[in-house]
């Protein structure tokens, strides 16, 4: 069962907005799978956001708290990668002139941007990818938490009685986090070779603090997506390329469960409803296949996604989009441009019903490596009151045999 809780807390008081409950499959599964409610060897946090300095002066600061738990009765070493997907201006500049009405707040030092409107004239807002890694040691049954945007984050290493540093991201960061179990009982003693064990479970909580009149805090959480190892017998793998299904380069056999063939999202349609509530659903996609050795130069395998949209009358509509390394988008911007959202097939007035279901299928071609994962967020507002919820999408079936994915983080060990 996936639960959506909308939360918006005014400083000094708590405003409860709504709770929506979606019923999912409750059947037990014994074979390795991709799920958000069971321990796994590889966990993925599709959306991490940090804006501790309110870089673009929107009146809101944001940070993400990561929770990671070792459910094993043994000590585990965990290796993690932050994937920074923050876009940058192609001309490297993003200056702000307060004397010019309508000029956008900016980041002149690094040229970070959200859209082309943030860049100086002649510059485009270009996707940018960079990966940074670190290791953690989790003792038996140890839970752990840290602020992604926090400085000086350290966690205890019970095996050495020392503290392990977790590197902070930049003060403005959009991206994902991947963590997986590796061999050894200490960070220094690990060869960083993945092991076939399923002990990790995680959650991410996004906090947004408004600096407007009265101030408010909005909080939303989702479970990390777990990709289970094929065999949980403690045996080590023979290289540092993790095979999600078979068929990817260097993957003759599956070491982890195959990524799903279809993502299923139940959601309200965007726009103003008859009750006066304005709704918007955002989806963040990340690829199953990533090469952390070459990600800065090549990103990830580009994947086309077909979307089938059903309303409450079971009428069907279609759209498509394209994913590379990371994509966060409002549903109503998948098939329209900003300012034209009312014409989208995801708009409540176009559909004529309040809610619907969208099935998202990555297009698999002759080349493997097209699996996708996703997390959804709903934003509801009525008057000055706002609330949000983050939740996991449902997954069905697995990619066809031979269409597997892989995660490579160093040159494979001979």
Image (cartoon, rainbow, N blue to C red):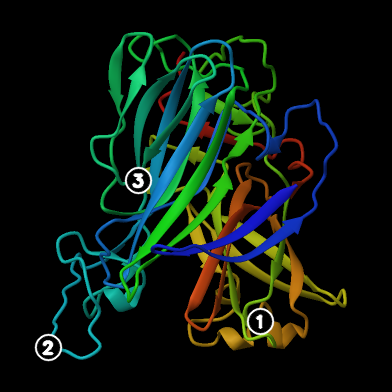
Separation of marks 2 and 3 at Cα, in angstroms = 37 Å
- How far from the left and from the top, in percent, is residue 268? 69, 72
Separation of marks 2 and 1 at Cα, in angstroms = 37 Å
Q: Which residue is mark 3?
A: 296
Labels 2, 3: front one: 2
Among the two numbered marks 2 and 1 on one chain, the one whose residue lies closer to the N terminus = 2
- How far from the left and from the top, in percent, is residue 14? 49, 62
Labels 1, 3: front one: 1
For label 1, the crowd category at 10 Å Cα-Cα, with few meaning under 14, some 14 to 19 and many 20 or more, is many
Residue 110: image quadrant is bottom left
Left or right of residue 169: residue 13? right
Q: Residue furthest bottom?
A: 101
Left or right of residue 322: residue 65? left
Separation of marks 1 and 3 at Cα, in angstroms = 36 Å
- How far from the left and from the top, in percent, is residue 294? 38, 39
Among the two numbered marks 1 and 3 on one chain, the one whose residue lies closer to the N terminus = 3
Helix, strand or loop at label 1? It is: loop
Helix, strand or loop at label 2? It is: loop
Helix, strand or loop at label 3? It is: helix
Residues at circles 2 and 3 in contact by the CB criterion of under 8 Å: no
Q: Which mark is residue 99?
A: 2
Which residue is painted at 49% across and 12% down in the image?
75
């Amino acid at each position: 069962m996936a639960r959506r809780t909308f939360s918006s807390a005014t400083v000094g008081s708590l405003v409860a907005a709504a709770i929506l409950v979606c019923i999912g499959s409750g059947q037990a599964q014994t074979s390795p799978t991709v799920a958000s409610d069971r321990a796994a060897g590889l966990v993925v946090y599709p959306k991490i956001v940090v804006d501790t300095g309110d870089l673009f002066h929107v009146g809101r600061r944001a940070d993400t708290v990561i929770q990671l738990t070792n459910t094993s009765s043994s000590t585990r070493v965990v290796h993690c990668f932050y994937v920074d997907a923050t876009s940058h201006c192609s001309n490297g500049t993003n200056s702000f002139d307060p004397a010019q009405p309508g000029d956008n707040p900016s980041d002149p030092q690094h040229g970070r941007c959200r859209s082309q409107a943030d860049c100086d004239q002649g510059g485009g807002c270009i996707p940018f990818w960079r990966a940074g890694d670190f290791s953690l040691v989790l003792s038996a049954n140890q839970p752990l938490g840290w602020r992604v945007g926090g400085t000086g984050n350290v966690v205890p290493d019970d095996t050495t009685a020392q503290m392990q540093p977790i590197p902070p991201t930049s003060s403005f960061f959009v991206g994902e986090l991947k963590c997986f179990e590796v061999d050894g009982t200490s960070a220094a003693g690990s060869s960083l070779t993945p092991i076939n064990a399923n002990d990790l479970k995680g959650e991410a909580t996004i906090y947004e603090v408004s600096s407007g009149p009265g101030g408010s805090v909005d909080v939303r959480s989702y479970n990390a997506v777990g990709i289970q190892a094929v065999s949980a017998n403690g045996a080590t793998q023979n290289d540092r390329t993790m095979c999600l299904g078979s068929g990817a380069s260097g993957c003759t056999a599956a070491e982890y469960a195959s990524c799903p063939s279809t993502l299923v999202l139940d959601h309200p349609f965007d726009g103003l409803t008859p009750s006066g509530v304005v709704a918007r659903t955002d989806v963040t996609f990340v690829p199953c296949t990533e090469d952390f050795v070459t990600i800065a130069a090549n990103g990830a395998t580009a994947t086309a996604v077909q979307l089938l949209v059903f309303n409450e009358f079971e009428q069907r509509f279609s759209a498509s989009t394209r994913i590379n390394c990371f994509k966060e988008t409002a549903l109503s911007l998948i098939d329209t441009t900003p300012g034209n959202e009312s014409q989208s097939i995801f708009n409540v007035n176009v559909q004529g019903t309040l809610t619907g279901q969208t099935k998202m299928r990555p297009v698999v071609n002759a080349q493997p490596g097209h699996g996708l994962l996703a997390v959804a967020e709903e934003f509801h507002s009525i008057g000055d009151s706002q609330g949000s919820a983050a939740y996991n999408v449902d997954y069905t079936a697995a990619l066809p045999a031979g269409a597997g994915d892989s995660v490579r983080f160093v040159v494979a060990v001979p």
